[in-house]
Amino acid sequence: MTLRGRKKGETVPQGVVSRLPVYFRYLTELETARVERISSAQLGEALDFTAAQIRSDLSYFGSFGQQGYGYNVEELLDQVKQILGIKQRYAMVLVGAGNLGKAIGSYEWFRAEGFEIEAIFDINPHLIGNYHGGCVIRPLEELQTHLQENPADIGIIATPKAAGQTVCDLLVAGGVDSIWNFCPTHLTVPDHVLVEDMHLTDSLLRLVFRLNERRAGNGSD
Amino acid sequence: MTLRGRKKGETVPQGVVSRLPVYFRYLTELETARVERISSAQLGEALDFTAAQIRSDLSYFGSFGQQGYGYNVEELLDQVKQILGIKQRYAMVLVGAGNLGKAIGSYEWFRAEGFEIEAIFDINPHLIGNYHGGCVIRPLEELQTHLQENPADIGIIATPKAAGQTVCDLLVAGGVDSIWNFCPTHLTVPDHVLVEDMHLTDSLLRLVFRLNERRAGNGSD
């Protein structure tokens, strides 16, 4: 991966990282709508960032824009995909086949972008043996053997709160070093393991905070 | 709501807002574990923020900490709840009773914290009439009448992508001015309506970016 604007070893600030998926989504919409080019001002207006913010974010990865032309949508999307690392295949295992697990397992977007759920595990005997999204739901005891034979890039945890840490430990023991966690608990992991938490409540709380700001007349818009 | 540290009309920066739920979750865990007080250094270590960052965030709402004592967990949690606005009841309607909608509808935490899903709507005749989380699933045509009789604070959209904007328009027409959107599409709303997007893909993409940074030896930890 060539990142022209970034020195080897330089870490991209968390704020930039958190905005990259937003660029990705919007540029994908533009490409689908066959829009050929866009200026940083237009991008800014659509995404509610300042044009300076956008130029600063994208300059982290090299300068794509041309004065008076803006960005070529297809090239920029291609670069953003490259930066995000979604031009390759990722093997995933999913633990938890309740409603949330099923919702994750049937998310069409994953397969289209190279994210493949290779196996689903649960402890509920009523679910084991059922098919979901092209995978049979297997007993949790088979997780270790599966991971030995099929190393996974990403482990998804969609269990109830009480099972989260146990499942996390099993995944880590099986060599999984990136965890996508939907379980509403704080996971403890060794230093080399990445955890990305997907806390439903955080998102709701941000909405409620803004709702109250607006009601109190403190809203910014 | 009294916000001692903040002038009337002053907007809290997005970064602070996005960290408040993290404080809320961790302080709730501390309170459950009967921890009585915590220093900004300890909070910082647990949450991976600097102590200075924490003091700065919390000072936005007034100064709670005492030199040499730290923060009283119960008082701080109480203040954070007050700031977030979760010491009151919120009425919610949920549109979409597929796997994701069912997962949202059965999230126990909501009711415990005053978030009440009052009605669930779908267009699938196989789902209509079923009970989920204490609510009967009703046909979407009844949404307008329901909202006229029972104004909702928050509308939750958990439909497939293609239905998202239509459902959003129905909610807004029914007087809902805060939308919690799980549908992977960009919603267009009038200025007075708040949208909080819950994009699964954004979270996965952040994880993958960090995974690749680490593999390339660019990781920060």
Image (cartoon, coloured by chain):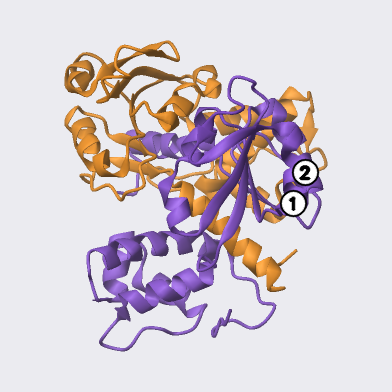
Chain colours: A orange, B purple
Circle 1 residue: B149
Q: Residue A203 placed where, x, y %?
A: 52, 51
Three-letter residue code for mark 1: Glu
For the residues beneath circles 2 and 1, the answer to whether they share a chain is yes
Q: Any mark on residue A12, and which?
A: none
Three-letter residue code for mark 2: Thr
**Which quadrant holds residue A36?**
top right
Residue sitting at the far bottom: B67
* Residue A192 seen in the figure: no
Q: Is residue B130 above or below residue B9?
A: above
- Tell me the element at label 2: helix
Gap between marks 2 and 1 measured at Cα: 6 Å
**Classed neighbour count for the residue bearing mark 1: other residues with Cα under 10 Å, few (<14), some (14–19), many (≥20):** few
Q: Residue A10 placed where, x, y %?
A: 41, 48
Q: Is residue A89 left or right of residue B142?
A: left
Give the residue at x 36% y 13%.
A130
Q: In the depicted view, which residue is nearer to us: B136 or A82? A: B136
Give the residue at x 29% y 81%.
B70
Q: In the depicted view, which residue is nearer to us: B58 or B144? A: B144
Q: Chain of mark 2?
A: B
**Which quadrant holds residue A164?**
top left
**Which quadrant holds residue A217?**
bottom right
Q: Chain of mark 1?
A: B
Circle 2 residue: B145
- Cβ–Cβ under 8 Å for marks 2 and 1: yes
**Classed neighbour count for the residue bearing mark 2: other residues with Cα under 10 Å, few (<14), some (14–19), many (≥20):** few
Q: Is residue A17 above or below residue B42?
A: above
Give the residue at x 70% y 26%.
B162
Q: Residue B188 placed where, x, y %?
A: 77, 43
